[in-house]
Image: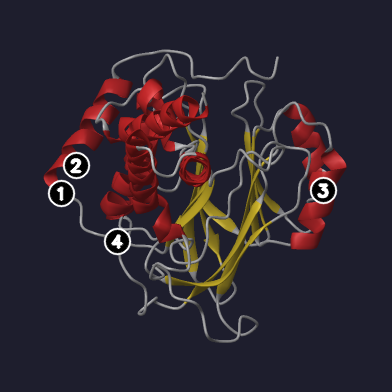
Amino acid sequence: MIPVVLTVLAAFCLIASLIPLLPFAHGMVRSFDFGRLQVIALAALVVAATMVFTPTAPADLITIGMATAAIMIQLLHVLRFTPLWPRQTAGFKGDPDTAATISVLACNVKESNHDYHLVQDMLREARPDVAVFMETDAAWGEALQRCFKDYPHTVLQPQENSYGMILASRYPLSDTEVRFLLNKEVPSISCVATLPGGHDVRIIALHPEPPLPLRDTYGRDAEILLVAEEAQEEKMPLIVTGDLNDVAWSRTTRRFLRISGLLDPRQGRGLFNSFDARYWFLRWPLDHIFHSRHFELVAIERQRFVGSDHFPMYYNLALTGGGDNEPPAEPDEDDIEEADDAIDAEKSRDRRPAGVDWED
């Protein structure tokens, strides 16, 4: 009985590893992008258990082979988010107190979470220069504004559909715009923050739709890739941040990096899993910051639990010119063509975004 169970588990791990390789923008396929760490852990347990219980049976060599193949496929995706991989963003070696730096906090508060004080306390302790809050309804907007004494510049877009967004900044903001890029119910924020010394940095905050198993992912993918095309043309130092509802190693995120030319500071450093904050065994990197070549990394920190299903993420970047950064690969024709196809497909229809009723 044990060998049969182990063989079934090994086959599941291999299939779960192969499904994301399919070029289909559908939740049934793209959902398998998320649990890569869990598949690695399960496949490793299968290998260990097989070697303990039936190490010499010929059939068990097949079990070990399938589980090992699954591990190798998954490692090809997640290994770049370990210290074994070269760092894409160079570490800043100067003095942050005298350099032009900007610290950014990305926090999905979860609309139904009413632990306002936990988020307020975390904000007071982290003291970022710019804070982006997602899933903010009117109640969250009121609670957050009570601790915005040091944040005189705000962009407020509370909504009751899990897509509300608030941006607060210590630094002056200009060219501020709340945009509904592809869906009239899904906002994003674009603005320019002026750092001390007069340096301007464009910030784009996103919270696209989550993938659902019975629905295509064009809503999410198209918004991410549309911003990638905008970033490709942006000459100003740029930061893109938010809960992208996509993992760092996915097909869409990798394409985003190639098209935009932006960098991921987690590469070569760690996973920094931000979701699901409630369950240690069900986590992956879902809350991101990507930046242009102008920056080097001062610090990256996952913040403590604040009652949400997401951990807030804190990043501090130094505006140096980034001469030691490792740029992403150049986009190819397929990248551009598939991005344009996804954007055109989503622009051509009018539908409610996924997840608007989850917090009811």
Q: Which residue bears the numbered disc 2?
A: 336
Contact, mark 4 vs mark 1 (Cβ under 8 Å): no
Q: Mark 4: few, some, or many residues within 10 Å (few <14, many ≥20)? A: some
Q: Residue furthest right?
A: 117
| Numbered disc 1: secondary structure | loop
Q: Earlier in the sequence, mark 2 or mark 3?
A: 3
Q: Which residue bears the numbered disc 3?
A: 120
Q: Amino acid at mark 1?
A: Asp
Q: Nearer the viewer, mark 2 or mark 1?
A: 1
Q: Nearer the viewer, mark 4 or mark 2?
A: 4
Marks 1/3: CA distance? Answer: 44 Å
Q: Which residue bears the numbered disc 1?
A: 332
Marks 4/3: CA distance? Answer: 36 Å
Q: Amino acid at mark 4?
A: Pro
Q: Which quadrant is home to the C terminus?
A: top right
Q: Earlier in the sequence, mark 4 or mark 3?
A: 3
Q: Amino acid at mark 3?
A: Gln
At horizontal 75% and vertical 35% (from top left) the residue drawn is 141
Marks 2/3: CA distance? Answer: 41 Å
Q: Which residue bears the numbered disc 4?
A: 328
Marks 4/1: CA distance? Answer: 12 Å
Q: Position of residue 202 (x, y in %)?
A: 46, 57
At horizontal 44% and vertical 66% (from top left) the residue drawn is 268
Q: Nearer the viewer, residue 139 or 105?
A: 105
Q: Position of residue 180 (x, y in %)?
A: 46, 30
Q: Is residue 329 above or below residue 179?
A: below
Marks 4/2: CA distance? Answer: 15 Å
Q: Is residue 255 visible?
A: yes
Q: Is residue 227 visible?
A: no
Q: Residue furthest front?
A: 56
Q: Mark 1: few, some, or many residues within 10 Å (few <14, many ≥20)? A: few
Q: Is residue 215 above or below residue 74?
A: above
